[in-house]
Image (cartoon, rainbow, N blue to C red):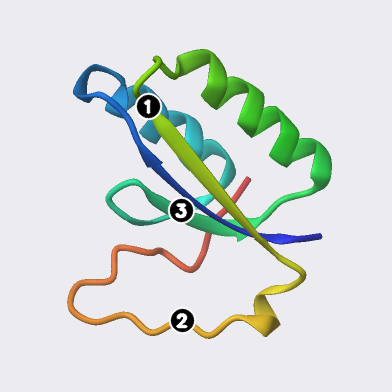
Amino acid sequence: MPYIIAVYDVGQKRVGKMLKLFRRYLTWVQNSVFEGDLTGAQLRQLQQEAEAIMAEADGVIFYQLRDERYSERTALGVDKAERSRFL
């Protein structure tokens, strides 16, 4: 299962919808930044739902890592990420 880091930059009117959508799939780390494990099907579903919300000037970036073990995470200041996430 790939480890996903996702970031988005959307218009103010759509921020709330994107936040709710991404929190259903991933752990909220910082404003507009999320991370977590997703299956291929979950990732495609998230991408489709995000695309349906987006307007022309909006953007979303998904980074896929083979596994969380291959990443190193350093947080400075307030870390909003909750490590215990339930589906």
Q: Is residue 48 left or right of residue 19?
A: right
Residue 12 location, x and y as percent? 20, 24
CA gap, disc 2 and disc 3? 13 Å
Rate crowding at label 3 as few (under 14), some (14 to 19) or many (20 or more) other CA atoms within 10 Å.
many
Pick whichever, 61 or 25, lies toward us.
61
Residue 68 position by quadrant:
bottom right
Q: In this view, does 81 lie to the left or right of 6?
A: left
Q: What residue sits right under mark 2 in the picture?
A: 73
Q: Which amino acid does label 1 sit on?
A: Asp
Rate crowding at label 1 as few (under 14), some (14 to 19) or many (20 or more) other CA atoms within 10 Å.
few
Label 3 vs label 1, nearer the camera: 1
**Residue at the spot 42% in from the left edge and 33% down from the top edge:** 59
Q: Along the polypeptide, which appears first: circle 2 or circle 3?
A: 3
Look at the image and tell me in which quarter the N terminus lies.
bottom right
Q: What residue type is labelled 2?
A: Arg
Pick whichever, 38 or 12, lies toward us.
12
Q: Is residue 71 above or below residue 26?
A: below
Q: What residue sits right under mark 1 in the picture?
A: 58
Q: Is residue 58 left or right of residue 79?
A: right
Pick whichever, 52 or 78, lies toward us.
52
Q: In this view, does 25 lie above or below 36?
A: above
Q: Is residue 43 above or below residue 65?
A: above
